[in-house]
Amino acid sequence: MDTIFNSKQEFIEEYREAVRELSGKKFEITSDIDRFNALAGLIASKARSVSARTDDRFKKEGKKRVYYFSIEFLIGRLLDNYLINFGIRDMVDEALREMGCNLDDLCRMEPDAALGNGGLGRLAACFLDSMAHEDIAGYGNGMRYRYGLFKQEIVDGRQVEVADEWLSRGYPWEVRRPDKAVRIGFGGHVVGHTEGDRIFYSVEGTEDVLAVPYDIPVVGFGGKTVNKLRVWSAEPIDEHFDLEAFNRGEYAMADASRADAEAISAILYPNDAGEHGRLLRLKQEYLFVAAGIRTALDVFRREHGAKWELLPDYVAIHTNDTHPAMCGPELMRILMDEEKLTWEEAWDIVTKTISYTNHTILPEALEKWPIATFSKLLPRIYDIIDEINRRWRDSFDTSQEGWQERLRKTSVLWDGEVRMANLSVICSHSVNGVAKIHTDILKRSVLNDFYALTPEKFNNKTNGITPRRFLAEANPSYSKLITEAIGPKWMDDADELKKLVEFEKDPSFLVRVGDSKRQNKVRLARYVRRETGLVIDPDSIFDVQVKRFHAYKRQLMNIMKVMDLYNRLLDDSSFSIQPTTFIFSGKAASSYTFAKEVIRLINSVADVVNNDSRVNDLMKVCFIPNFRVSNAQLIYPAAEISEQISTAGKEASGTSNMKLMMNGAITLGTMDGANIEIAQLAGEENEKIFGLTTPEVEELRASGNYFAWDVVNADRDRLGRVMSELTDNTFAGLSGNFDSIHNEVMSNNDYDLVLKDFRSYVDAWEELTSSYADTRDWNRRALHNTAMSGWFSSDRTIREYRDEIWHA
Ligand code: CBF
């Protein structure tokens, strides 16, 4: 562990000085926000020094640089994490206490940087942590949105979106680098220039904006490697401030060019694996791609000169989903138009440098842009895509049967649209899915035609999560217990967690596992009370489903289970359940009406159930508003049941399943995404699996023989009743009935198979919870889940990317 302070005394002195410099006040009279800003500023400056040293070392070692392009990085708070990664958390905690303040209070002052929606963005953040941990020269390249993902408030049970002004009190981690700003052109027209026997192209008459980078340090565990996350902000190119307009009192007009430019990086689109298609989004995509490629090429040229044929040996460009798909054409543009390489030379370099991860099979999330919009905004990029497409078409062997159909499916330009997934595959040397089943589905269905042509490109990289944030930082009591048992090496090498298996036979250790869980439940109960006023019982089972709201994730099925249990408790005095708190949290995209109605339903059911004294000692429903990285870190450690109940074949991987497993929750899930790998690793006997499998879902759909009404009619007493209660005022007290949910499910013939899987789900829940009374065995299973969760460390995932894709 490299240290950034030689002693506690040295830290105290430097910190006092930092507070004084920043606030101009004596430490004793400063506020927590001053103290936080000074502390984060001090750690950031230390991190930057290590980063400079890391960079020199990488240069000397001639390391290959990996640029991870992602339109989202859901990094959350950094202070606690970086203190852990620098190995100084306990020392700083003690020093602050001596100085009369509290580290946790300061950590809470940090804005929860929400530059992402959910799984994809958080994965990118975990990968940054693991790249630094694995000493990879890995750099994040993304967008610096002025407003992160909206804040969710709940009013009358409804989600209300509020702007997230995360930068309003400053952000001490970032450094603005105007010297590295890049000019980005939109619109204009392509002009050809003849030089000898070649024609080179440029774009004239563009409207330009400036992409200005902000660098955030990424501290690797052990403190030896500090990398960078570079996020781009859009600004006007020169101050076209219209003084005349200003003097006329037309203030908005006077500064119009600033507003137009800044709009590009103003806001993160709040869709998770959902529909896109706005012009501004396309501008965002090009801006961070073009600016990031420029950074990568500048660094390469500085280190290796213009020997572009060596680019794939020293640079890997990874595209996280299709949002950075323009990396291919943009790199082609620079290599041909500016560096004068031929198409063939440039194409060889591009396809050896770029790789692509697919994160979803949902058709609405596979990006497509109307050609008319695209070609007008980015005419040269469009021309290059057109040529990529033409060459792709020409490569088809037309003597082979079925070539037309294969071309239709793999073409980049089709039906007046630019298909970004096809562009990503064609420009990449590697295409990967994010869990075994997901990669299989890509190969056999969504990208099957590509797979048939180039099977060697396809590979799987099951997702992972960083154990530093999601176990060490989030769950101090359990981490302490684990370290006592197996030593501290697990933070460095999560495989070490396997050693916990030995302790499954130790009854006193299992009691301590239970004690730690209870402590975390008490901590969460306090948070819930503070945030919502609801009192929940830490002695009840904490049954948790926290993730984005989406029909396929089936939060609806979960709350229908709660409705069914409630009905049965009221009707049947011989029926009982283990006391349970049903915990939900998550956001719905602002335009996704169905998902928002499900949130309203959960809150409406909560309103009825939580106010019914007949059942309150057995059940409570709790919706935790504004799910984000910081409160997720309180929820995962307190969970006992991890609800992973998506329709089989729909969740590419999921990562909350891994975070909950690592924190000792038992998975109640379908055979979907990474749940399958969880069940294989921990053993099905230590989880609870239910529902249709992917082949069964596919068969059922293909048979054309599924009728939702038949399922409801066959189970009138329970399922039928729950469905009726959506419209019969039972839960309408808060803000009305739920006809829209009823109609959506029935008119789409139960597309997500909520009704079909309902009974097997409720049965599985009952079986699982009835085993809770055997505390010792429950704790053993919890510990076993933690012990087997090491494989889901993002360090393992990143090593696979490094060895099998980036060759870094
Ligand atoms: O791979 C990371 C995650 O990405 C998504 O969230 C996405 O946005 N496409 C998927 O829905 C998750 O299954 C996946 O774990």
Image: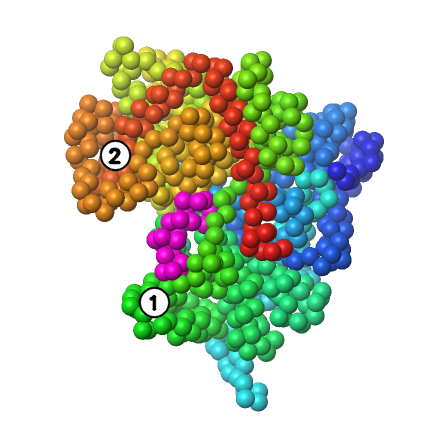
Q: Was residue 448 drawn as part of the magenta stretch in this picture?
A: yes
Identify whether 94 is placed above or below 336.
above
Q: Can residue 251 be seen from the camera position used here? A: no
Asked whether residue 787 is in view, the answer is: yes
**Mark number for residue 756?**
2
Disc 1 marks which residue? Answer: 407
Q: Position of residue 616 (x, y in %)?
A: 37, 15
What x and y, as percent, mark residue 217?
67, 47
Which residue is at 52% across, 49% downward? Answer: 72
Left or right of 493 in this view: 59: right
**Which of the pair 153/522 is nearer the observer?**
522
In this orientation, which residue lies closer to the viewer: 788 or 627? Answer: 788
Q: Position of residue 804 (x, y in %)?
A: 56, 53
Q: Amino acid at mark 2?
A: Lys
Q: Residues within 10 Å of mark 2 (few under 14, many from 20)?
A: some
Magenta stretch, residue numbers: 433-452
